Amino acid sequence: MGGNSPCASCKLLRRRCAKDCIFAPYFPSDDPHKFAIVHKIFGASNVSKMLQELPVQQRVDAVSSLVYEANARVRDPVYGCVGAISYLQNQVSQLQMQLAMAQAEIVCIQMQPTQISLDQLVDDKSSILQNHYFNFASSSSSSRSANVNICDSLNRDNIFGYIIS
Ligand SMILES: [Zn+2]
Protein backbone atom coordinates (compact mmCIF):
# COMPACT_ATOMS: atom_id res chain seq x y z
CA MET A 1 0.00 0.00 0.00
CA GLY A 2 1.14 3.55 -0.58
CA GLY A 3 2.71 5.17 2.45
CA ASN A 4 0.13 7.92 2.81
CA SER A 5 -3.07 6.04 2.01
CA PRO A 6 -5.28 5.96 5.10
CA CYS A 7 -6.58 2.67 6.53
CA ALA A 8 -10.21 1.74 5.95
CA SER A 9 -11.19 3.08 9.36
CA CYS A 10 -9.64 6.50 8.96
CA LYS A 11 -11.04 6.74 5.45
CA LEU A 12 -14.55 6.08 6.73
CA LEU A 13 -14.15 8.35 9.76
CA ARG A 14 -12.58 11.04 7.51
CA ARG A 15 -9.55 11.56 9.69
CA ARG A 16 -5.82 11.52 9.20
CA CYS A 17 -4.33 8.05 9.53
CA ALA A 18 -1.47 8.42 12.02
CA LYS A 19 1.62 6.21 11.93
CA ASP A 20 0.51 4.49 15.11
CA CYS A 21 -3.16 4.22 14.05
CA ILE A 22 -4.63 1.37 16.10
CA PHE A 23 -6.90 0.27 13.26
CA ALA A 24 -4.40 0.33 10.43
CA PRO A 25 -2.90 -3.19 10.93
CA TYR A 26 -6.36 -4.82 10.96
CA PHE A 27 -8.46 -2.74 8.61
CA PRO A 28 -6.59 -2.28 5.32
CA SER A 29 -7.93 0.24 2.84
CA ASP A 30 -8.67 -2.45 0.26
CA ASP A 31 -11.37 -4.00 2.47
CA PRO A 32 -13.62 -1.10 3.51
CA HIS A 33 -16.59 -3.37 4.32
CA LYS A 34 -14.70 -5.03 7.18
CA PHE A 35 -14.45 -1.83 9.19
CA ALA A 36 -17.81 -0.45 8.06
CA ILE A 37 -19.71 -3.38 9.51
CA VAL A 38 -17.76 -3.42 12.79
CA HIS A 39 -18.29 0.34 13.13
CA LYS A 40 -22.00 -0.04 12.43
CA ILE A 41 -22.51 -2.68 15.12
CA PHE A 42 -19.98 -1.78 17.83
CA GLY A 43 -18.95 1.80 17.08
CA ALA A 44 -15.42 2.86 16.19
CA SER A 45 -14.55 4.21 19.64
CA ASN A 46 -15.61 0.98 21.36
CA VAL A 47 -13.54 -1.06 18.92
CA SER A 48 -10.59 1.24 19.53
CA LYS A 49 -10.98 0.84 23.32
CA MET A 50 -11.25 -2.94 23.04
CA LEU A 51 -8.11 -3.14 20.92
CA GLN A 52 -6.16 -0.87 23.28
CA GLU A 53 -7.00 -3.06 26.25
CA LEU A 54 -5.60 -6.15 24.52
CA PRO A 55 -2.01 -7.26 24.09
CA VAL A 56 -0.88 -6.78 20.49
CA GLN A 57 -0.67 -10.53 19.75
CA GLN A 58 -4.37 -11.00 20.58
CA ARG A 59 -5.69 -8.15 18.48
CA VAL A 60 -5.90 -10.06 15.20
CA ASP A 61 -8.14 -12.68 16.79
CA ALA A 62 -10.21 -10.01 18.51
CA VAL A 63 -10.78 -8.22 15.21
CA SER A 64 -11.82 -11.39 13.41
CA SER A 65 -14.25 -12.17 16.26
CA LEU A 66 -15.70 -8.66 16.06
CA VAL A 67 -16.09 -8.93 12.28
CA TYR A 68 -17.73 -12.35 12.61
CA GLU A 69 -20.12 -11.19 15.32
CA ALA A 70 -20.94 -7.99 13.44
CA ASN A 71 -21.84 -9.97 10.31
CA ALA A 72 -23.95 -12.34 12.40
CA ARG A 73 -25.71 -9.38 14.05
CA VAL A 74 -26.60 -7.94 10.67
CA ARG A 75 -28.06 -11.27 9.54
CA ASP A 76 -29.79 -11.96 12.85
CA PRO A 77 -30.20 -8.77 14.90
CA VAL A 78 -31.78 -10.59 17.85
CA TYR A 79 -29.45 -13.52 18.44
CA GLY A 80 -26.33 -12.71 16.43
CA CYS A 81 -23.90 -15.60 16.35
CA VAL A 82 -25.70 -17.24 19.28
CA GLY A 83 -28.41 -18.09 16.75
CA ALA A 84 -25.89 -19.97 14.62
CA ILE A 85 -24.39 -21.68 17.67
CA SER A 86 -27.72 -22.93 18.97
CA TYR A 87 -28.75 -24.06 15.48
CA LEU A 88 -25.54 -26.11 15.23
CA GLN A 89 -25.92 -27.47 18.77
CA ASN A 90 -29.41 -28.58 17.83
CA GLN A 91 -28.05 -30.34 14.77
CA VAL A 92 -25.37 -32.05 16.85
CA SER A 93 -27.89 -33.42 19.34
CA GLN A 94 -30.20 -34.59 16.54
CA LEU A 95 -27.31 -36.36 14.84
CA GLN A 96 -26.23 -37.91 18.15
CA MET A 97 -29.76 -39.24 18.55
CA GLN A 98 -29.72 -40.67 15.02
CA LEU A 99 -26.34 -42.24 15.70
CA ALA A 100 -27.56 -43.84 18.93
CA MET A 101 -30.60 -45.21 17.07
CA ALA A 102 -28.42 -46.60 14.30
CA GLN A 103 -26.16 -48.22 16.88
CA ALA A 104 -29.18 -49.76 18.62
CA GLU A 105 -30.32 -51.12 15.26
CA ILE A 106 -26.91 -52.64 14.64
CA VAL A 107 -27.13 -54.39 18.00
CA CYS A 108 -30.58 -55.71 17.07
CA ILE A 109 -29.39 -57.00 13.73
CA GLN A 110 -26.39 -58.65 15.39
CA MET A 111 -28.73 -60.32 17.90
CA GLN A 112 -30.67 -62.11 15.15
CA PRO A 113 -30.31 -65.86 15.83
CA THR A 114 -30.10 -67.24 12.29
CA GLN A 115 -26.56 -67.72 11.14
CA ILE A 116 -26.47 -65.96 7.81
CA SER A 117 -23.38 -66.50 5.71
CA LEU A 118 -21.50 -63.46 4.50
CA ASP A 119 -22.57 -64.07 0.89
CA GLN A 120 -26.21 -64.25 1.86
CA LEU A 121 -25.81 -61.15 3.97
CA VAL A 122 -24.47 -59.21 1.03
CA ASP A 123 -27.25 -60.51 -1.22
CA ASP A 124 -30.05 -60.02 1.26
CA LYS A 125 -28.73 -56.92 2.90
CA SER A 126 -31.06 -54.50 1.18
CA SER A 127 -34.15 -56.63 1.68
CA ILE A 128 -33.31 -57.23 5.34
CA LEU A 129 -32.88 -53.54 5.87
CA GLN A 130 -36.04 -52.73 3.95
CA ASN A 131 -38.04 -55.23 5.97
CA HIS A 132 -36.53 -53.91 9.11
CA TYR A 133 -37.36 -50.32 8.28
CA PHE A 134 -40.82 -51.26 7.09
CA ASN A 135 -41.42 -53.07 10.34
CA PHE A 136 -39.92 -50.15 12.20
CA ALA A 137 -42.32 -47.77 10.51
CA SER A 138 -45.53 -49.77 10.62
CA SER A 139 -47.33 -50.66 13.80
CA SER A 140 -48.53 -54.07 12.55
CA SER A 141 -46.88 -56.98 14.30
CA SER A 142 -47.38 -59.78 11.83
CA SER A 143 -45.63 -63.13 11.74
CA ARG A 144 -42.15 -61.86 12.39
CA SER A 145 -39.62 -63.77 14.38
CA ALA A 146 -39.54 -63.13 18.10
CA ASN A 147 -36.20 -61.46 17.82
CA VAL A 148 -37.35 -58.91 15.28
CA ASN A 149 -40.24 -58.09 17.58
CA ILE A 150 -37.79 -57.45 20.37
CA CYS A 151 -35.88 -55.10 18.08
CA ASP A 152 -39.14 -53.52 17.09
CA SER A 153 -40.20 -52.71 20.61
CA LEU A 154 -36.71 -51.57 21.41
CA ASN A 155 -36.94 -49.16 18.52
CA ARG A 156 -40.40 -47.93 19.33
CA ASP A 157 -39.77 -46.97 22.91
CA ASN A 158 -36.08 -46.50 22.58
CA ILE A 159 -33.64 -45.31 25.19
CA PHE A 160 -34.62 -41.69 24.65
CA GLY A 161 -38.25 -42.33 25.48
CA TYR A 162 -39.44 -40.94 22.19
CA ILE A 163 -42.30 -42.60 20.38
CA ILE A 164 -41.37 -43.24 16.79
CA SER A 165 -44.30 -43.34 14.43
ZN1 LIG B 1 -5.95 4.58 10.31
Image (spheres, rainbow, N blue to C red):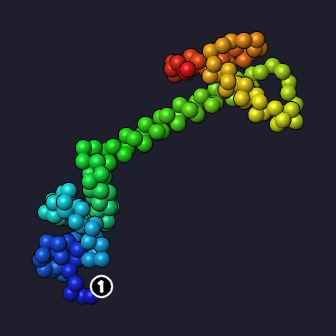
| Quarter placement of the C terminus | top right
Residue 64 lies, with reference to residue 114, above or below; the image says below
- Give left or right: position of 142 versus 9: right
Any atom of ligand 1 within 8 Å of the CB at mark 1? no
Residue 54 image point, x, y percent: 23, 61
Residue 142 image point, x, y percent: 72, 12
Residue 64 lies, with reference to residue 19, above or below; the image says above
Taking the spot 75% from the left edge, 22% from the top edge, the residue there is: 111
Q: Is mark 1 on a helix, strand or loop?
A: loop
Residue 53 makes an appearance in the image: no
Residue 87 image point, x, y percent: 40, 41
Q: Answer with the quarter of the image where residue 151 lies.
A: top right
Residue 12 image point, x, y percent: 17, 72
For the residue carrying disc 1, how many other residues have a C-alpha within 10 Å: few (<14), some (14-19), or many (20+)?
Answer: few
Q: How many labels does the image show?
A: 1
- Give left or right: position of 130 versus 42: right
Residue 131 lies, with reference to residue 82, above or below; the image says above
**Residue type pointed to by label 1:** Met
Taking the spot 68% from the left edge, 20% from the top edge, the residue there is: 135
Residue 142 lies, with reference to residue 7, above or below; the image says above
Residue holding disc 1: 1
- Give left or right: position of 91 versus 35: right
- Foreground residue, 152 or 108? 152
Residue 82 makes an appearance in the image: yes
- Foreground residue, 145 or 165? 165
| Quarter placement of the N terminus | bottom left
- Foreground residue, 34 or 165? 165
- Give left or right: position of 100 versus 142: left
